Image (cartoon, rainbow, N blue to C red):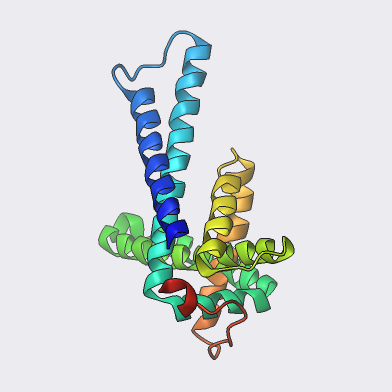
Amino acid sequence: MKAHKLLVILLLALFICGLFLVGYAYAGDLKIPPKAKEFRWNFLTAYGGLIFLLWATGLAAHWLLLGSFPNRTERLTTLFERSPWKSLLIGLVNLFVIMMLVGVTSEKLPPLAMIFIVIFGISLFVGIHSRSRALGRKILKAAKHEPSAFAEITVGWSIVAFICAIPFLGWFVLAVFYFAGGLGALTLSFFKKPAKSGGVDLDSHLD
């Protein structure tokens, strides 16, 4: 439990740091500064702060999901590990269909479009949990460390979050790659029998 407490303290510290950077960048006059260097500094501090905020809040949400549904998230992660490319293809199809539904309903039926967006957001988050955790598990095992549930999601989510933050390449290529795989695994979980856990004994890490 001491390690978990240290992680929580680190999470809060980075969250406060992110708030400080965003506030510093946008406090006062929001006009573009006349000097290019000043503008670049403001942009970098704001962008960096936003990334830290997304990473910190995302990690807290992943820990909450893991603690609330340990067995289901473990089965979902194992399912992705068994069918990574199938999950990716199904996820890409799902992304296209959902974007089409949101586009069609956004003008004529805005409330329905919002419902689609909420469902999509929740599904995407749960899906990326399995994708991130599978990545963290693979890295920890390759490094010959005994993986724990919280260590897997911490390592995996940190890598996914910061890689997807790379301008353009991360936004439009890597983010789609990682998000689609998780979304596809979530879709497969509704049609396949629960996969036997291939990871760790969760109960021993949640006490």
Depth check: give the residue in front, 161 or 139. Answer: 139
Residue farthest along the bottom direction in this orientation: 193
Above or below residue 67? Residue 172 is above
Question: On the picture, is 134 further left or further right than 74?
Answer: right
Q: Residue at x 48, y 34 (%)?
A: 48
The picture places residue 96, in percent across and down from the top left corner, at 53, 63
Q: Residue 64 at x, y = what percent?
A: 37, 65
Q: Residue at 43% across / 46% down in the picture?
A: 10
| Side of 82 relative to 175 (left or right) | right
Image vertical order of residue 82 relative to residue 62, above or below: below
Image x and y of residue 28, in percent? 28, 18
Residue 47 higher or lower than 186, as above or below: above
Residue 79 lies in quadrant: bottom right
Instruction: Please give the name of the residue rendered at 26% of the width and 61% of the height, measured from the top-left corner.
Output: 111
Q: Quadrant of the C terminus?
A: bottom left
Residue 103 visible in the displayed image: no
Instruction: Identify which residue, 125 or 110, lies in the foreground.
Output: 125
Q: Residue furthest left?
A: 111
Q: Quadrant of the N terminus?
A: bottom left
Residue 153: x %, y % from top left:
53, 62
Q: Is residue 148 visible?
A: yes
Q: Height in image: 170 above or below 139? A: above
What residue lies at 55% left-to-right and 80% top-to-bottom?
A: 188
Q: Check the image and name the residue furthest to the front.
A: 2
**Image check: 199 left or right of 111?**
right
Q: Quadrant of residue 169?
A: top right
